[in-house]
């Protein structure tokens, strides 16, 4: 598979993936599965080079990103951080400053770098 160099190449690759996937998992040969993997890797490489997502620049932004990555709802996050739903909501909306225990939990439970936390409180 040639490298994807532009948006037109990318669209062609995605259309080929879609057509192969439309057959259904039980109707695809091993060669086609291999082709899907190769095409998907090419598409992923193009996407990573083309679509750069900036890292969050606020503590709330970083927490929201980790929530997304960990597939957590706000209620689940509150439980994980050992705070009430209401308190988490206040912190996330900027209406209450986070306390030390909350920040420690953010660091340990969400694996957010301590230096980042200190710089953004």
Image (cartoon, helix red, strand yellow):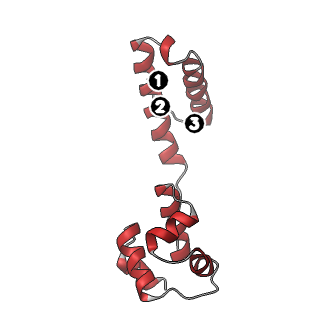
Task: Please give left or right for residue 47 compared with residue 29 in the image.
Answer: right
Residue bearing the label numbered 1:
36
Q: Is residue 62 visible?
A: no
Q: Return the x and y of residue 11 as percentages of the image width and height.
A: 62, 30
Neighbor class of circle 2 (other Cα within 10 Å; few <14, some 14-19, many 20+) is some
| SS class, disc 1 | helix
Image point 43% across, 19% down: which residue? 33
Residue closer to the observer: 71 or 19: 71
| N-term mark: 3 or 1 | 3
Comparing marks 2 and 3, which lies closer to the viewer? 2
| SS class, disc 2 | helix
Q: Return the x and y of residue 39 as percentages of the image width and height.
A: 47, 27
Residue bearing the label numbered 3:
6
| Pointers 2 and 3 in contact (C-beta within 8 Å) | no
| SS class, disc 3 | loop
Q: Return the x and y of residue 71 as percentages of the image width and height.
A: 51, 54
Neighbor class of circle 1 (other Cα within 10 Å; few <14, some 14-19, many 20+) is many
Image point 45% across, 73% down: which residue? 81
Residue bearing the label numbered 2:
40
- On-image quarter of the N terminus: top left
| Pointers 3 and 1 in contact (C-beta within 8 Å) | no
Task: Please give left or right for residue 73 compared with residue 99 in the image.
Answer: right
In this rendering, the answer to whether 62 lies above or below 24 is below
């Amino acid at each position: 598979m040639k490298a994807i160099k532009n948006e037109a190449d990318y669209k062609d690759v995605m259309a080929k993936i879609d057509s192969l996937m439309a057959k259904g998992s039980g109707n695809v040969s091993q060669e086609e599965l291999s082709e899907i993997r190769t095409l998907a890797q090419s598409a992923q490489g193009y996407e990573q080079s083309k679509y750069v997502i900036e890292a969050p620049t606020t503590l709330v932004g970083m927490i929201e990103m980790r929530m997304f990555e960990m597939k957590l709802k706000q209620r689940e996050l509150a439980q994980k951080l050992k705070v009430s739903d209401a308190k988490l909501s206040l912190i996330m909306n900027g209406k209450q400053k986070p306390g030390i225990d909350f920040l420690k939990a953010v660091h340990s439970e969400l694996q957010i770098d301590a230096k980042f936390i200190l710089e953004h409180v």
